[in-house]
Image (cartoon, grey):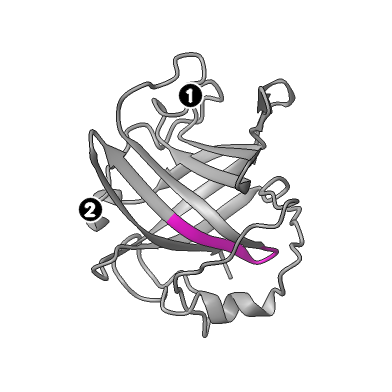
């Protein structure tokens, strides 16, 4: 499995993702020994990317009130002819098993979709006026690029730090005028 080496020291991940161990979800503690999960205010460097980080990741998502959920995200490389839309890069797609409702987020349907035209998980990367932005968007309807959603619910991760041994950042979920948010940590399954 190829891994991208980010400019930020990998040793900091163990400090940044500690409290992720424990909690309910898909069984077992996904956190590497001694790791914690905490919010981060890091800013992505201009060359940050999840490209090359195919594989299965254990995830912990935490709500502001302390509720947490464990889950799994599996990334695969997108077909070559589907890796961009305009100026947005779409390097990875995949599937996920995360009980978003347990942390007060919208639980998107179709997170198990392996159809590249409507993947259960889609990574979107772009350069914006505010800097580099990476989104991991959940749900087949949200990721249907042939029928873009103009209204509806969206649940996404926004990585703030990407390292060879995982990534972490914030999550946001919106439906109608309501939104909820928190933070997450992810590291390769089997760590």
| Image point (50%, 14%), residue name | 146
Asked whether residue 56 appears in the rendered view, the answer is yes
Compared to residue 172, the image places residue 12 above or below, namely below
What's drawn in magenta, residue-wise? 163-170
Q: Secondary structure at mark 1?
A: loop
Whether residue 55 sits left or right of residue 41 in the image: it is right
Q: Secondary structure at mark 2?
A: loop
Q: Which residue is mark 1?
A: 118
How crowded pointer 1 is (Cα within 10 Å; few <14, some 14-19, many 20+) is rated as many
Magenta segment main secondary structure: strand
How crowded pointer 2 is (Cα within 10 Å; few <14, some 14-19, many 20+) is rated as some
Whether residue 12 sits left or right of residue 113 in the image: it is right
The outermost residue toward the bottom is 34
| Image point (53%, 76%), residue name | 16
Is 165 within the magenta?
yes
| In-front residue for pair 169/30 | 169
Asked whether residue 32 appears in the rendered view, the answer is no
- Residue 104, which numbered label? 2
- Res 89 quadrant in image: top right
Whether residue 7 sits left or right of residue 67 in the image: it is right
Whether residue 66 sits left or right of residue 12 in the image: it is left
Q: Total of numbered circles in the picture?
A: 2
Q: Nearer the viewer, mark 1 or mark 2?
A: 2
| Image point (64%, 33%), residue name | 90
Is 141 within the magenta?
no
The outermost residue toward the front is 129
């Amino acid at each position: 499995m190829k891994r991208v080496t980010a400019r930020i020291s990998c040793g900091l991940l163990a400090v940044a993702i500690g409290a992720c161990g424990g909690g309910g979800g898909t069984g077992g503690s996904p956190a590497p020994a001694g790791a914690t999960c905490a919010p981060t205010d890091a800013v992505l460097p201009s060359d940050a990317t999840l490209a090359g980080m195919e594989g299965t990741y254990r995830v912990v998502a935490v709500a502001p009130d302390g509720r947490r959920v464990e889950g799994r995200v599996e990334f695969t490389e997108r077909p070559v002819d589907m890796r961009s839309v305009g100026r947005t890069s779409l390097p990875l797609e995949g599937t996920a098993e995360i009980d978003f409702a347990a942390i007060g987020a919208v639980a998107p349907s179709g997170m198990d979709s392996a159809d590249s035209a409507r993947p259960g998980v889609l990574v979107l990367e772009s350069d914006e006026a505010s800097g580099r932005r990476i989104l991991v968007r959940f749900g087949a309807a949200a990721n249907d690029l042939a029928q873009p959603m103009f209204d509806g619910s969206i649940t996404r991760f926004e990585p703030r730090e990407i390292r060879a041994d995982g990534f972490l950042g914030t999550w946001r979920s919106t439906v109608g005028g309501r939104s909820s948010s928190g933070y997450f940590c992810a590291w390769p399954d089997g760590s």
